[in-house]
Image (cartoon, helix red, strand yellow):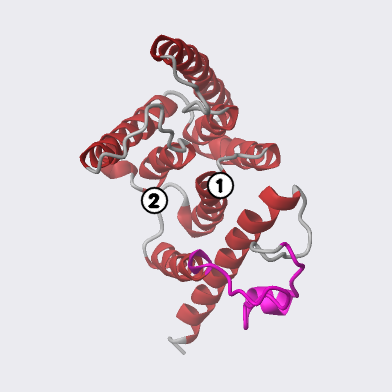
Amino acid sequence: MRIILPIKIALLGFAGGIFVNYISDVLPQTRTLSKPICMNCGHPQSWANYILWPRLCPSCGKRRRLRIWAVDAIAIIIALWLWYSPPEILGFWVGFVLLVYFGSLVIMDLEHRVILHPVSIFGAVLGLGIGIWLHGFWDTIFGGAGGFGIMLFLYFFGGIFAQRLARRRNEELEEIALGFGDVNLAGVIGLMLGWPGILAGIFLGVFSAGVFSFFIISGMIVAKRYKPFSVIPYGPFLVLGAVMLLYFKGIFLP
């Protein structure tokens, strides 16, 4: 029956959303893939409670955050979209797995401001496979090296610039814009985009981050809440650049 297939794809999307939430909740807190825990009190959760219902901590009594439900719903929508409109160069399965990986990474960076080494290592393995499949071995290697090298330069340059500016203003620098996790992520994305695709990927990521920062800073100035050296996570914007080129290449590249 026709209704069975969309249900199966929706369930696959739901499973992907559960995985994204689990990785984003547990890995930054425990640094291991342990049993689910409550994000409010750290109490262990049963798998049935965590995945299905009531999604309520038996210790502190708090329900899980709205993000959990939003990710589940978005993952289902994305799975259905990918099935009926698969990206030309990736197809459904690779496109789905890659978005699950990207989703986990983005949430961790937004909520915890960290891109963990195990996440980067898994991404490098995934990116190497995708890159060789799409671009061949050497373009993949050069793309990874190029992404890592370009972002490493920006990492050191940005850190030096921010420190000197802070000294000149006699202000304390608590956090820099780019972390080394962003450098690793650029290398991972470089493997996926190959060479010279990574140049376009970094440009799109940096440009979108700049546009977003402009509106955020403008809003803070208008609200009189602006603080110098306000930092935004760069990982989501690097991912955005990669998604533009991998899933919508015909729009952003000739």
Task: Sort mark 2 into few (<14), some (14-19) or many (20+) by Cα contacts within 10 Å.
Answer: few
Q: Which residue is mark 1?
A: 105
Of the 4 image quadrants, the one containing the C terminus is: top left
Q: How many marks?
A: 2
Question: Which tag is nearer the camera, tag 2 or tag 1?
Answer: 1
Tell whether position 57 is magenta.
yes
Identify which residue, 2 or 110, lies in the foreground: 110
Occupied quadrant, residue 49: bottom right
Q: Is residue 229 above or below residue 239?
A: above
Residue 43 position within the rendered picture, expressed as x and y whole percent measured from the top left: 75, 67
Residue 203 position within the rendered picture, expressed as x and y whole percent measured from the top left: 35, 27
Task: Please report the residue visible at 54 percent of the width from the left and 44 percent of the height from the top.
Answer: 109
Q: Secondary structure at mark 1?
A: helix
Q: Is residue 124 above or below residue 77?
A: above
Identify which residue, 190 or 174, lies in the foreground: 174
216 with respect to 59 (left or right): left
Task: Please report the residue visible at 55 percent of the width from the left and 55 percent of the height from the top.
Answer: 100
Q: Are the residues at dot 2 and dot 1 in contact (C-beta closer than 8 Å)?
A: no
Occupied quadrant, residue 234: top left
Residue 76 position within the rendered picture, expressed as x and y whole percent measured from the top left: 47, 70
Occupied quadrant, residue 236: top left
**Which stretch is magenta?**
42-68
* Tag 1: amino acid: Leu
Task: Please report the residue visible at 50 percent of the width from the left and 38 percent of the height from the top.
Answer: 134
Tell whether position 170 is magenta.
no
* Picture disc at residue 160: none
Q: Which residue is mark 2?
A: 88
Residue 179 position within the rendered picture, expressed as x and y whole percent measured from the top left: 55, 28
Sequence-wise, which precedes: disc 2 or disc 1?
2
Q: Main secondary structure of the magenta part?
A: loop
